[in-house]
Image: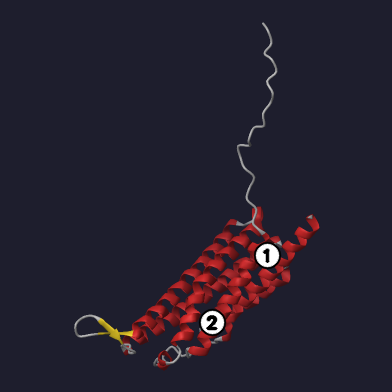
Amino acid sequence: MQSRPDVPSTPVAPIVRAGLRTPRAAAIAGIIFSVLLISSLWLLRLSVPADPHETGAWLATETKRVTIALNLVPYAGIAFLWFIGVLRDRLGAREDRFFATVFLGSGLLFLGMLFVAAAAAGGLLLAYTVTPSAAGGALPGGQVDPSTFGFVRAFIFAVMRIYAFKMAGVFMIAVSTLACRTRFIPLWIALLGYGCSALLLLGSGVFDWVLFVFPAWVLLVSGVILVDKWRLGATAS
């Protein structure tokens, strides 16, 4: 039998493509989240009394400032999702299933309840701008039924101060525990996270300033990750 002539080899495309790499700029997401949430909380603190039993006198003068604060929340939520992705990428194969589930679940619960509270506040502002007419339409107003206002105000307080930021505390505990086990972030940040989470779990429903602890801690974590990524990139180049 005659041997087959040599056939020039052609490169074969790999069946499995190389995994996508998270861009270094993704670490900025945590910084964006922190800046937006701190700005939103600060505007709300300046505009709305902390007392959940207040009568709503701020509706007549502070609606524009509160509207700006609420409009920042969706963008902060988007950035927080990216921040969760950055943490999971940094953990990589070291991710523990149990603590990773708690970490991811508490983060998503915090974000969902933050959106619910912001939507309820936005609905309250919208209800204030219109009053029902006798014909069934809506006319420019400036009144809210006291019982409706009382319920919505108490609902927002409970969702934000009692539930959402306590989930943020659980998120910090899970991330700090993963950091202690894997050292994917410095140990001192993990220990600081335990202390900050205790403040949130015990004081979020009592002290206004405690709410700023969570975005400030995320800002610190994001800054460390960003500096570390830039340092590694400079070493590799």
Image side of residue 176 versus residue 208, left or right: right
Q: Tag count in the figure?
A: 2
Q: Quick check: 13 above or below 160?
A: above
> Mark 1: which secondary structure?
helix
How many angstroms separate mark 1 from mark 2 (CA)? Answer: 28 Å
Q: Quick check: 22 above or below 186?
A: above
**Residue placed under numbered mark 1 in the picture:** 179
Q: Which numbered disc, 1 or 2, marks the residue that appears first in the sequence? A: 2
Q: Residue at x 51, y 83 (%)?
A: 205
| Residue 33 quadrant | bottom right
Label of residue 59 in the image: none
> Mark 2: which secondary structure?
helix
**Residue placed under numbered mark 2 in the picture:** 41
Q: Residue at x 67, y 70 (%)?
A: 221
| Residue 2 quadrant | top right
Badge 2 crowding class, 10 Å Cα cut-off, few under 14, some 14 to 19, many 20 or more, is many
Asked whether the viewer can see residue 161, the reply is: no
Which amino acid does the dot numbered 2 rest on?
Leu
